[in-house]
Image: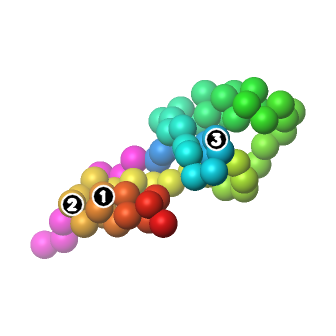
Amino acid sequence: MDKQVLKMPLICVEIHESKFRWFWDKVEAMKFAKTLYNADMLIMNEPPIYEHDLELSPESVCKFLNEREM
C-alpha cells in the first residue's frame, strides 16, 4: 500500500542574499514582493518569487530544508 503524503504549496519571496520570507497565500506573497521590489508585475517561479510544494513526510521535509541550505 502506498503512503499517503500531504502536499502544501508554499510561496517563497527572496529578500536579499539567500534570505527568504515564506507565505501560504499567493496574494499576500505577491503583494509583499511587489512592495519590496517596487514592481507592478511579477511572474511566479521567476526571481524573486517562487512556489514550492512541500510534502509532509520525514524524508521530503529533510530534503526540502537541505535544499534551502545550499
The residues bearing labels 1 and 2 have C-alpha atoms spaced at a distance of 5 Å
Q: Which residue is mark 1?
A: 61
Residue 3 in magenta? yes
- In three-dimensional space, the C-alpha distance between marks 1 and 3, rounded to whole angstroms, equals 22 Å
Q: Residue at x 48, y 45 (%)?
A: 10
At 75% from the left and 27% from the top, the residue drawn is: 35
Instruction: Say whether disc 1 or disc 3 marks the residue closer to the N-terminus.
Output: 3
Q: Nearer the viewer, mark 1 or mark 3?
A: 3
Q: CA distance from mark 3 to mark 2?
A: 27 Å
64 w.r.t. 17: above or below: below
Query: SS for tag 2?
Result: helix
What is the tally of numbered marks visible in this picture?
Answer: 3
The image position of residue 12, as x and y in percent, is 56, 45
User: Mark 2 belongs to which amino acid?
Assistant: Pro
Q: Which residue lies under the disc numbered 2?
A: 58
Residue 65 vertical position relative to residue 9 in the rendered view, above or below: below
